[in-house]
Each structure stands twice: as structure tokens, then as C-alpha cells.
Amino acid sequence: MSTQEAQDLTVRKTVVVDCSPEQAFDTFTERIYTWWPFESHSPANERPESATFEPRVGGRLYDRTASGDEHEWATVLVWEPPTRFVVDWHVTPGNPSTELEVRFVPEGDGTRVELEHRGWEAYGDEAADTCASYNRGWEAVLKPFVEAAGR
Amino acid sequence: MAYQDPMDALGDRTRRAIFEQLRKGPRAVGEIADELPVSRPAVSQHLRVLKEAGLVTERRNGTRRIHRVDPDGLGELRAYFDEFWNEALAAFKAAAEDERRNG
């Protein structure tokens, strides 16, 4: 598998938000519970009552349900507020874990938020072989997102 | 195509445990049941859901049925996140901008 193909496995998203990088960074991390779509993606089988993003390298991102169960989503690898953070993302079942990087870049009066979810190649060569067939599908998914983000 | 969402299929803790077992290597139903506090019929039922979600495939080896992680299913999982982040970032954008107006 070539380097080019490996890069193609990375999920990349960009969204421009109408606020400062500090505000965007704090919303993404400290206030993650206020916006995270738990209905679509939650490690627990019930909606948690809190989600905590510990603000330091080695810190944990975890949620806690009403019954007191904790579920860890990620651990912090790089912590550079309000510029970027990188976490080891292991909420997805099955090893190995993937890596999520989010960068906050000033753009005019707002902030361009660049998200990279990578490391899928760690799922093995089979995943890389699979990736080629998904490329066309990704383009179809990305196009409406780019249009929406551009508004 | 009646594809169940891979994340729905993995929303159950027992199914997650079975999936993690299979990530270590192909296994028969009995081998999975031996390593988990779950009966063989229950394992079979969970495997059916994982197969419907495209995460696991099955092949016959003589009289044994061997289950393994479907590499296309991992592609599904990745594709799931591709779509998921669209939704999550839209919600994030609304929250970040709402915070600015209120704060």
C-alpha cells in the first residue's frame, strides 16, 4: 500500500464557526456535553448525565451515566489550547484505537475548525484494500458537507 | 440492502465483547462462548446481528462454522465516522456560536 493510499483512509472535516478560537476550543472540549450527539454515538447503552474532557496531556475524555458507570472515549496526547488537541480515540469497540486531531485556525472574525480522524490503516492491510472501493462513496458524502460548511 | 448500522450493532456490550474476541482471530461459536459469560445460543444470536451489520462474516470448515471480522465491515465503521462527524460538527458549530451570543 502506498503512502498516498494510507492518507486516503483519513476522515477529514472542516467547519467555519462564527466565534474566536478560544471559544471554539472551549466548546469542543470543556463543554462537549452541551453539543455531542449522544443519540447517534454514545459508548453507554443509555444517555450519560455528564461528559468530562480532562484538560491536559494524559487526561481522559469520559462520560458517566446516572447509575455511576464511566465509559472512556479517549485519552489526550497533545494539548495546545486554543490551537489544537490530539486524542487517542478508543470509544470505537475493537482494537487498535484510532487518533483524532482537531485544529482551531483563526479565519477572519471566526475560526476554521479542521478535524482529522486517522489511523484506520491500523485495522490491517485488509482495511487498506477496502479503502479504495470506498473512495467514491466518501466523495459523495463530503460534497454536501463542504457546501453546508461553506454557507 | 438491509444493512444494520454498525454502531447500533456495537451498541450492545456483549456484542462489543464478541467483536473484540473476533478481532484477535477467527473463532467458532463455542470458542467465543467459552471466553464469555454468555450461552452458545446467545452468542449465535449476537453473531447474527453482527453479520447483518456487515461487521462479521462466516465460513464453513467441515461441520464447523468459523466467524471472523469482515474487513468490509471495518470500512463501514470508517464510513460511519465520516458521516457522524458531519452531524457532530454541525451540533458543535451551533453550540459554539450560541455560547458567543449568550456569553
Image (spheres, helix red, strand yellow):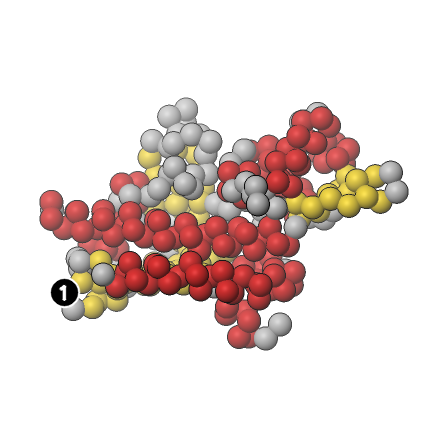
Going by the picture, which residue comes out furthest to the front?
Answer: B1
Parent chain of label 1: A
Tell me the residue that label 1 is attached to: A109
Residue B3 in view (yes/no): yes
Count the marks: 1
- Point 52% across, 42% down: residue: B5
At mark 1, the secondary structure is loop
Residue B17 in view (yes/no): no
Up the image or down, A34 lies above or below A110; here it is: above
Q: Considering the image in quadrants, where does the C terminus of chain A appear?
A: bottom left
- Point 66% across, 45% down: residue: B56
Up the image or down, A112 lies above or below B47; here it is: below
Please state which amino acid type lies under the numbered disc 1: Asp
Q: Is residue B24 left or right of residue A50?
A: right
Residue B3 in percent (x, y) is at 56, 43
Going by the picture, which residue comes out furthest to the right?
Answer: B62
Question: Which residue is at the front of the view, A42 or A148?
Answer: A148
Q: Is residue B37 left or right of residue A78?
A: right
- Point 20% across, 68% down: residue: A107
Q: Considering the image in quadrants, where does the N terminus of chain A appear?
A: bottom right
Residue B101 in percent (x, y) is at 11, 48
